[in-house]
């Protein structure tokens, strides 16, 4: 690993560089959804095929996350960061130029592959070069992602109003070129390969986890389809394949001399409970919050504009409380903010499920409740991000990939279950309320896990 004295870094411009990259990818996770109708009309295709531009991005992103983490250890953080930004930028340009929906879907997978490498390599850069400030720098990532998620729909609306759907892809090109220039200027070159840990590529392990994730996501996608029954072969076959590939993956990494992911990083002491918390308080909660606009429309008949603005309330609170907890985490340690954040998330989910109190309108009630949920997620973020990294800083890139993968799995699973229930419900609003109430109870029951999170005070 680099020596911070031998490889000095200008921390502020370096952090701005990786932050711009993280914002670019987080914006892309929401901006395309806002232009689906215009994209469908512009390419003369069906809404089904237009929707696959979102699915393809999710597939490519999840599949490439662990691979990107491993490559970051093998090839070097800066090199993988540069490659990822280059791939993302070129793919964005080609996405904006294409006039064929099938080509666009393929390019979205390529774009996702580039985007997947940014978080692991950016985390590795911060851990390697930021010394005693790395815990706070990594914690600030939790404030960056909500910013991108909030401004994505705004940018999408502006592009559709004053330009066209192609603008949501073209906007990444100048930003990507700026990030490439800043990376070359402000982030030191990677150390010689002889100074990096041995990180041989485990191709069987990559194949097993790739099949597991792809088949699992296919099963989850079909689970959310309105016209596909639960016992359909389209769900059961990929689900069984995912379970088999997952079993083979764990069987393989326990016996391999150079496993794709070291088993302790997945389920070892400390790591296992942190990964589970990332699924529960990160992924599933993100999925639940993402569906609140749908809930607001189904149960209370709010307009699309009112329903969408609820997520702004959640995002503002998440940013503010993530920043506050970043400053306090050295004194509080990890468990206190996790207990507080989980309590706020559980209470928020319960209140979402209940009808408005105090004579408030449904909009005002849900605005207040989503703000409460943002407080919870913002409080949890810095602690859940640092708790695993401080156990193995040299594996920062892979741990960042595992964390993001855990969040993605939780989000996809929750959204698939909810959409399956709603597809057979006679009253979707009430059904979704019961699901939020059930999730609130599970959050309360899962809080005992926090006692097993490895505690730490101060910098690491």
Image (cartoon, rainbow, N blue to C red):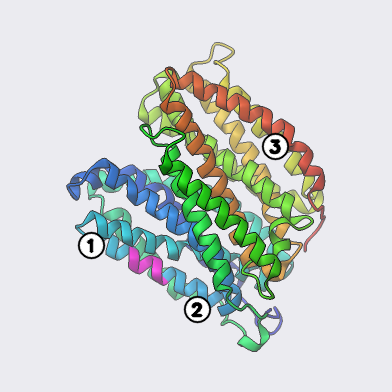
Disc 3 + disc 1, Cβ < 8 Å: no
* CA separation in Å, label 3 and label 1: 44 Å
**Could you tell which of marks 3 and 2 lies nearer the N-terminus?**
2
Residue at 51% x, 52% y is: 241
Which residue is tagged 2? 185
Q: Secondary structure at mark 1?
A: helix
Q: Viewer-nearest of labels 2 and 1?
A: 1
Where residue 129 appears, as percent x and y from the top left, is 66, 73
Q: Secondary structure at mark 2?
A: helix
Where residue 122 appears, as percent x and y from the top left, is 56, 66
| Above-or-below relation of 361 to 321 | above
Left or right: 116, with 171 as reference point? right
Residue 97 bears which disc, if any? 1
Residue at 61% x, 67% y is: 397
Which residue is tagged 3? 342
Residue toward you, 325 or 424: 424
Where residue 225 appears, as percent x and y from the top left, is 39, 36
Q: Viewer-nearest of labels 3 and 2?
A: 3
Segment colored magenta: 86-91
**Could you tell which of marks 3 and 1 lies nearer the N-terminus?**
1
Instruction: Tell me which corner region of the image, top left, top right, bottom left or bottom right, holds residue 314.
Output: top right
């Amino acid at each position: 690993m680099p020596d911070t004295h031998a490889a000095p870094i200008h921390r502020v411009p370096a952090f701005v560089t990786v932050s711009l990259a993280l914002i670019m990818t987080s914006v892309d996770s929401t901006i395309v959804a806002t232009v689906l109708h215009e994209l469908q009309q512009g390419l003369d295709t069906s809404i089904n095929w237009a929707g696959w531009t979102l699915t393809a991005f999710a597939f490519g992103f999840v599949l490439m996350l662990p691979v990107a983490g491993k490559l970051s250890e093998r090839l070097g953080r800066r090199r993988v960061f540069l490659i990822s930004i280059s791939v993302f930028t070129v793919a964005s340009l080609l996405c904006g130029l294409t006039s064929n929906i099938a080509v666009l879907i393929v390019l979205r997978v390529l774009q996702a592959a580039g985007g997947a490498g940014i978080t692991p390599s950016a985390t590795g850069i911060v851990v390697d070069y930021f010394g005693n400030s790395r815990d706070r720098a990594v914690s600030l990532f939790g404030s960056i992602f909500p910013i991108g998620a909030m401004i994505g729909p705004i940018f999408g609306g502006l592009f559709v109003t004053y330009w066209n759907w192609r603008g949501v892809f073209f906007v990444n090109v100048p930003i990507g070129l700026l990030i490439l220039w800043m990376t070359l200027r402000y982030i030191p070159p990677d150390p010689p390969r002889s100074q990096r840990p041995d990180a041989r590529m485990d191709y069987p392990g990559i194949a097993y986890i790739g099949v597991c994730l792809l088949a699992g996501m296919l099963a989850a996608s079909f689970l959310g389809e309105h016209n596909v029954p639960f016992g359909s072969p389209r769900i059961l076959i990929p689900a069984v394949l995912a379970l088999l590939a997952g079993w083979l993956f764990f069987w393989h990494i326990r016996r391999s001399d150079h496993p794709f992911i070291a088993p302790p990083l997945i389920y070892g002491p400390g790591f296992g409970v942190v990964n589970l918390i990332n699924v529960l308080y990160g992924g599933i909660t993100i999925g639940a919050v993402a569906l609140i606009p749908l809930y607001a429309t189904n149960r209370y008949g709010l307009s699309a504009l009112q329903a969408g603005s609820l997520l702004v309330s959640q995002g503002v609170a998440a940013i503010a409380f993530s920043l506050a907890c970043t400053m306090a985490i050295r004194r509080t340690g990890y468990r206190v903010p996790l207990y507080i954040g989980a309590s706020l998330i559980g209470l928020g989910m319960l209140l979402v499920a209940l009808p408005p109190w105090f004579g408030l309108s449904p909009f005002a009630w849900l605005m207040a409740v989503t703000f409460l949920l943002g407080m919870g997620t913002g409080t949890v973020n810095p602690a859940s991000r640092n708790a695993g990294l401080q156990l193995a800083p040299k594996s920062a890139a892979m741990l960042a990939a595992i964390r993001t993968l855990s969040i993605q799995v939780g989000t996809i699973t929750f959204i698939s279950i909810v959409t399956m229930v709603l597809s057979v419900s006679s009253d979707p609003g009430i059904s979704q309320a019961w699901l939020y109430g059930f999730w609130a109870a599970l959050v309360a029951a899962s809080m005992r896990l926090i006692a097993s999170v490895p505690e730490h005070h101060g910098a690491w």
